[in-house]
Amino acid sequence: MNYRKLGATESAISEIGFGAWGIGGNQWQGAKDDESLRALHRSFDLGVNFVDTALAYGEGHSERLVGQAVAKTFHSVMVATKIPPKNRVWPATPDSKIEDVFPYRYVVESTEQSLRNLGLEQIWLQQFHVWTDAWTETEEWRRAIEDLKASGKVRFMGISISEHEPDTALEAVKTGLVDSVQVIYNIFDQAAEENLFPLCQKMKVGVLARVPLDEGGLTGTITPESVFEPGEFRESYFRGDRKQQVAEHVKALEEELKNVPGTLPEIALQFCFTNKAVTSVIPGMRRVSTVESSCRAASAGPLDAATMAVLRRHKWERNFYK
């Protein structure tokens, strides 16, 4: 496992992080706690030292599982979590008011709840779970960051950027108040490369690449016949003819990757951390087999320029979250 410093901080985290949304269980059917805990411990054994969770994942269930695993390991693990919007609206809109989404007292109370769930005295990285740059000049979030850090409850603060809208946090990054951003970045969605990544490098802000496998689309396992459990997030994400669309794009992608070592998911992860702006890639890892595959990608190292050129041709502009 290789490690990269988070922005301007002195803390180095693994190139592959443990994405813990799936273990929360509320929108991902089939998650089993014992299997999730085994996956967490296996990731620590393979060198993963960074876990990304959120208070909203299973209404704290993901945080509690992460806390259990961290408490029982001898490895040093850095935990990131997120403050859900008070109005429970994802994504945030430019006309939403910060006092309805992240009022000061609510930010502090959510952080305290996460600390209890995790069983920690300090959250290594706390993040706003939605964002719009319309809030950049407001005082509410700035004071919350300052006070949470001063109290020792939080070490670093970041922003989780709305789906497919990487430019909606550019002004916040320019303030120098955030230590990291979390953004969708994968072979299909490369939009963050245009403006966000160069700015983050200039400002020395860390980048967490989420959804590196396009919610499963880049695993090569989604076919027109794929069926998801009723109520599962992916039932909506891949609704209608979207499975057919994904299968066609993946087939074209695989044709060009025949001579590239590794599975499609491994190459998809390599694509993300080959970009030097990216600090860590955080695939969802509910199972030991996924942990091991993801860590193999890390050990394989970055992709060569020729392979990256091929992958860049497969950029696909669309939004399945709507």
Image: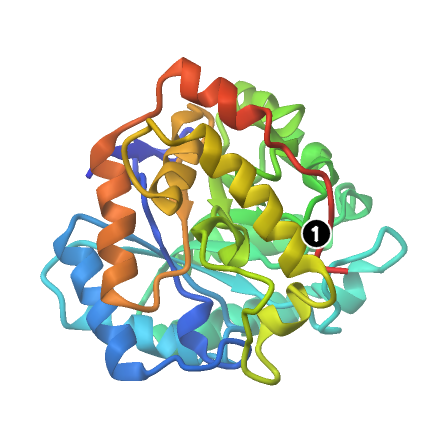
**Residue at the location (50% across, 40% down)?**
180
Q: Is residue 63 above or below residue 250?
A: below
Task: Mark yes or no: residue 148 visible.
Answer: yes
**Residue at the location (55% across, 75% down)?**
227
Q: How is the image coloured?
A: rainbow
Nearer-the-camera pick, 43 or 129: 43
Side of 66 where 56 appears, left or right: right
Kind of residue indicated by mark 1: Trp
Characterize the local packing of mark 1: few (<14), some (14-19) or many (20 or more) Cα atoms within 10 angstroms. Answer: many
- Quadrant hosting residue 63: bottom left
- Which residue sits furthest top? 305
**Location of mark 1 (residue):** 131
Task: Mark yes or no: residue 119 visible.
Answer: no
Residue 48 placement (x, y as % from top left): 23, 50
- Quadrant hosting residue 83: bottom right
Residue 97 placement (x, y as % from top left): 84, 60
Nearer-the-camera pick, 66 or 108: 66
- Which residue sits furthest left? 74
Side of 277 where 10 appears, left or right: left
Nearer-the-camera pick, 217 or 43: 217
The quadrant the N terminus occupies is top left
Circle 1 SS class: loop
Nearer-the-camera pick, 14 or 96: 14
**Residue at the location (75% across, 69% down)?**
89
Q: Is residue 68 above or below residue 237?
A: below
Residue 221 placement (x, y as % from top left): 45, 58
Residue 76 placement (x, y as % from top left): 18, 54
- Quadrant hosting residue 232: bottom right
